[in-house]
Amino acid sequence: MSIQTQKLIYHLTCIDNLASILDRGIQPRSALSGYVDIADGEIIESRQKLGLENYVPFHFFGGNPFDGRVQKDHPEKEFVLITVRREHASAQNWQIIPRHPLADEDIKLMDYAEGFSTIDWAKMNERNYSDDHSKSVCMAECLSPDVVLPERFFSCYVANSSNQKTVLESLNAAGYDKHVNINEGMFVKR
């Protein structure tokens, strides 16, 4: 199935952050405190220069190069992919960057419709991470300017049944009834 026609966007986080997320929502980096940081320091600094720390980033598919890098850099951590429906992002006119935000100096935020139509979906569907353009397009972002509350979450993905149990317990304790899917292919094999 083409990534373009799928229905969800994905936010990867450490499972250790889930209780806080269920309490306060997924917050922009500029508003975060007391969380397990999984991002690369140099990339954070570059994103700040573009003002991207004020947005909550989502990707258009799970298991993209960002997700893989973070998991390889933190093999001791367990992860969860939180999904939101693309129709919500579209209705709220979230912003889109059609390739990796640090791909070049000319990156600009686009309204949802313009950004969505600008993405090179053929290259994204290739998922050819040895091709710089394909890899960059695979890291296109959909950016929420606001905290993304748990009520907006559609479902979660995890790598195994142990993580599924942990996430379901956290969701239930916070009063949320969300489906938690096991999909090993979205996560780095250990």
Image (tube, grey):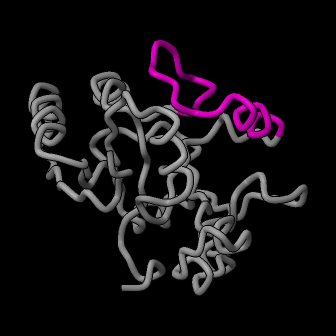
- Up-down relation of residue 170 to residue 63 (above or below): above
Relative to residue 30, is residue 166 drawn left or right?
left
Quick one: 76 or 141, which is closer to the camera?
A: 76
Q: Is residue 136 magenta?
A: no
Give residue 48's quadrant in the image: top right
- Up-down relation of residue 5 to residue 175 (above or below): below
Q: Position of residue 99 (x, y in %)?
A: 69, 65
Give the quarter of the figure containing the N terminus: bottom left
Q: Position of residue 11 (x, y in %)?
A: 43, 48
Relative to residue 116, is residue 26 drawn left or right?
left
Give residue 63's quadrant in the image: bottom left
Relative to residue 73, is residue 170 drawn left or right?
left
Q: Magenta span covers which residues?
A: 28-49
Give the quarter of the figure containing the C terminus: top left
Quick one: 23 or 104, which is closer to the camera?
A: 104
Most extreme residue toward the front is: 190
Q: Is residue 30 magenta?
A: yes
Quick one: 139 or 108, which is closer to the camera?
A: 139
Q: Position of residue 55 (x, y in %)?
A: 61, 41
Quick one: 55 or 82, which is closer to the camera?
A: 82
- The residue that appears at 71% across and 64% down in the rendered structure is 110
